[in-house]
Image: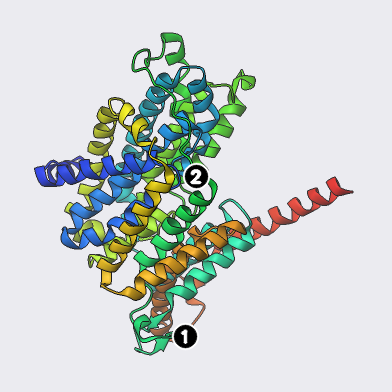
Amino acid sequence: MIDQFLLGLGVVLQPQILMYAFIGVFIGQLIGVLPGIGAITAISLLLPVTFYLDATTSMIMLAGIYYGSQYGGSIASILLNLPGTPSSVVTCLEGYPLSKSNRGGLALFVAAFSSFVGGMFGVAILVLAAIPMTIIALRFGAPEYAMLVILGLLAASLIGTGSQIRSFAMVVLGIALGLVGADQTTGYYRFVAIPELADGISLVSLAMGLFGVSEIIRNAAVRSTPGRVMSIRMRDVIPTRAEARTLGLPILRGSSIGSFFGALPGTGAAIASFMAYAIEKRVSRTPEKFGTGHLPGLAGPESANNAAAQTGFIPTLTLGIPGDAVMALIIGALILNGIIPGPRLMVDQPELFWGVIASFFVGNIILLLINIPLIRLWVLLLRIPYQKLYPVIIVMICVGVYSHRTSVTDVVLTLAFGILGYVMKNYRFEPAPVLLGFVLGPLLEDNFRRAMLIYRGDFTVFLTRPISAILVACSVVLVVFAIRSSIKARRKTARVLS
């Protein structure tokens, strides 16, 4: 295992690849600082760039954007009470009060250090779990993959936040959008209203529209002037010995929680950070200090979301199952580069697999080194008025979409999906399950059809094969648990109203 990790270090320390790793984490941190944009917009925008790079370099750059945004998201949360990423929402609860009390520099340092430790913890878990997961995954056939995809889709719609019925409806919508175009087996056109849709809907168009354009419309409608930027002193950012002693256990707990939730499909860094904050408040001897600028309440969630960002690659790389919308984009980028993620990835593409994992180790060190010195730069960038920033992003999105397939239809679809995403969010329909259904739907169809062909239409194969049966049982338990929780919530609401 150490030999494989050293192989990955040898790949990522090549000057050209190291340069793209730096570019990725730098862009990710920049995107994280800018509220309302997020890593998924940046990754969607840079997907066309990956066509001009080899798969290893492009994956290292895109992964750097993802976990770099976790670092950057805390900056706007602490300075302006504006979460740069969904996972940094909890950071506002403790970081902004610290900033208002002229301890913003300390809050930024604690956030950066906690993020670094959480990220390194996640890398260690990723290295240790990758080979065992792949050994298990090599036993997967078409029935196992079909049931695994179903479990992932159910987890995305039932475990996440918000209404389970709404999330499930969005998953179904994503699957339906993934069916547009020519059938891969028969060649028949499905849901093709115009000839331009014969090749299907572009993943880039869907992602940019639902997450990029919709957020721009939403933020432009809410904010017309830049927020208040507080002055940050670069001295006095180091915590005292007494404060440092209170951070060890929260960081360890947050890293463990983030590593666990990051590896579960349908959860991700946002849920991990909320869980870490809730647990930290529950185990604290001074829960009354939470919400007033309590450092353990800041360190726990920050370490959790960065650990989750690393371990989220476990199911993505070893099983081909994305844990959240960003991981779905990573899988999409791999497929666009002609590489199918899954259990054979470690065997067929060892340099890519271990190079990406080793880049997490290098990237976290780079982020720690550049995070604190660049605080003043991030503050200056936050002074840019929103009405000047978003038109530039819209133009860049249109250029990126058009360069993907040189199709004006894709640009129009991107804008249409942007309006759809804006309407969905206004009515509390989350767009992330749509992207998960869009990516996983075709995989479910292909593997289910292959299983039926191999076993001559015998549905019992999903119950007679051990791994497939276990996945079926997990899916059933998940559905029963969701129904039971929903019934309890309705009974509780009825008692309150009565």
Q: Quadrant of the N terminus?
A: top left
Report helix, strand or loop for mark 1.
loop
Amino acid type, residue under disc 2 in the picture: Ser
Amino acid type, residue under disc 1 in the picture: Gly
Measured in 3D between alpha carbons, the distance from the residue under mark 1 to the one under mark 2, in whole angstroms, is: 58 Å
Read off the residue under disc 1. 457
- Residue displayed at 60% across by 19% down: 289
Q: Are marks 1 and 2 in contact (CB under 8 Å)?
A: no
Q: Is residue 465 above or below residue 220?
A: below
Picture quadrant of residue 8: top left
- Residue displayed at 46% across by 48% down: 268
- Residue displayed at 89% across by 48% down: 498
Q: Is residue 465 above or below residue 365?
A: below
Q: Is residue 321 left or right of residue 345?
A: right
Q: Position of residue 32 (x, y in %)?
A: 38, 41
Q: Position of residue 145 (x, y in %)?
A: 41, 68
Report helix, strand or loop for mark 2.
loop
Q: Is residue 234 above or below residue 241?
A: below
Task: Tell me if residue 439 can be seen.
Answer: no
User: Tag 2: Cα neighbours inside 10 Å, few (<14), some, or many (≥20)?
Assistant: few
Q: Position of residue 410 (x, y in %)?
A: 35, 72
User: Tag 1: Cα neighbours inside 10 Å, few (<14), some, or many (≥20)?
Assistant: few
Say which of marks 1 and 2 sits in front. 2
Q: Is residue 283 left or right of residue 376?
A: right
Furthest residue to the top?
241
Q: Position of residue 249 (x, y in %)?
A: 47, 23
Picture quadrant of residue 330: bottom left
Q: Is residue 263 left or right of residue 459?
A: left
Read off the residue under disc 2. 224
